Image: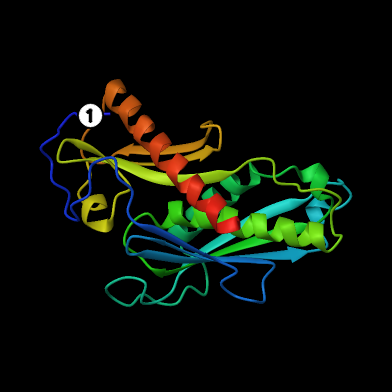
Amino acid sequence: MDSIKSDFQRPDGREFDELRQCRVYPHWTSNPEGSVLIECGGTRVLCTASWEDQVPSWRAGSGLGWVTAEYAMIPRATGTRNSREGGKNSRSQEISRLIGRSLRMAVDFEAMGECAVYIDCDVLQADGGTRTASITGGWIALKEAAQWALKNGRVAKDFIKHQISAVSVGIVEGAEVLDLPYAEDCKASTDMNVVQTESGEFVEIQGTGERSPFSSSQLSFLLDLASKGNKELQIKQREALA
């Protein structure tokens, strides 16, 4: 795979199709049924999965389970202090919904039964890609919770049917690049977040021409970059669970 603009130099010295260093620490806290600290470059997110033996009232009687997510940034996740998120702002709500939609694609709700898993993603340090790191780490926490439920007799079989990960891609100074840190994200002409399954099928694509439109050939190239990145992230997920 060759970048259309091969002379572009990334601020951190990576190749255009290279992920930031990704570290995954499973079972990072002892209280939740699933938890993981995921580090993608300078971005660090704590993802926890909490099991409940009931579903929200609107889901009761359906015989189906439920998975939902909440996303927030701690006050000094960025360079300056933000107010603690007591009530959610619109950005956090939008990202929470994205994480929830993405992770629900992983689940067989009938096999889960009328139980729920709540995924909490707390950004400890932000350097771009917090929502994609939350999805990638959130799936690991969800899988840990599923393993806990099976071990403790809450379910009869593993209800996780898909592996889910997410990564960002974009166009910066005319070059298509994978896994954007903040220094690239803030000046990208096109910014995209891509969620995929283990077979490469797309769960969600969020793409915006922020400073200029992009072509169909650029879109195809970006999706190929994302597929490469997601395959590598899914190897990290499996290694963490092993």
Q: Is residue 104 visible?
A: yes
x and y, in percent, of residue 99 in the image = 54, 51
In the image, what residue occupies the spot 51% across and 46% down? 234
Image quadrant where residue 117 sits = bottom right
User: Callout 1: few (<14), some (14-19), or many (20+) C-alpha neighbours within 10 Å?
Assistant: few
Q: Is residue 55 visible?
A: no
166 on left or right of 156:
left
Nearest the viewer among 195 and 90 is: 195
At label 1, the amino acid type is Asp
In the image, what residue occupies the spot 14% across and 41% down? 173
Image quadrant where residue 163 sits = top right
- For disc 1, the marked residue is 2
x and y, in percent, of residue 50 in the image = 69, 66
Name the residue at the top extreme. 216
19 on left or right of 59:
left
Instruction: Say above or below: 242 vs 3.
Output: below
Name the residue at the left extreme. 7
Nearest the viewer among 91 and 24 is: 24
Nearest the viewer among 241 and 52 is: 241
User: Which of the image's four quarters has the N terminus?
Assistant: top left
In the image, what residue occupies the spot 68% across and 53% down? 67
- Image coloring type: rainbow
In the image, what residue occupies the spot 33% across and 48% down? 19
Q: Secondary structure at mark 1?
A: loop
x and y, in percent, of residue 233 in the image = 46, 47
Give the mark count.
1
User: Which of the image's four quarters has the C terminus?
Assistant: bottom right
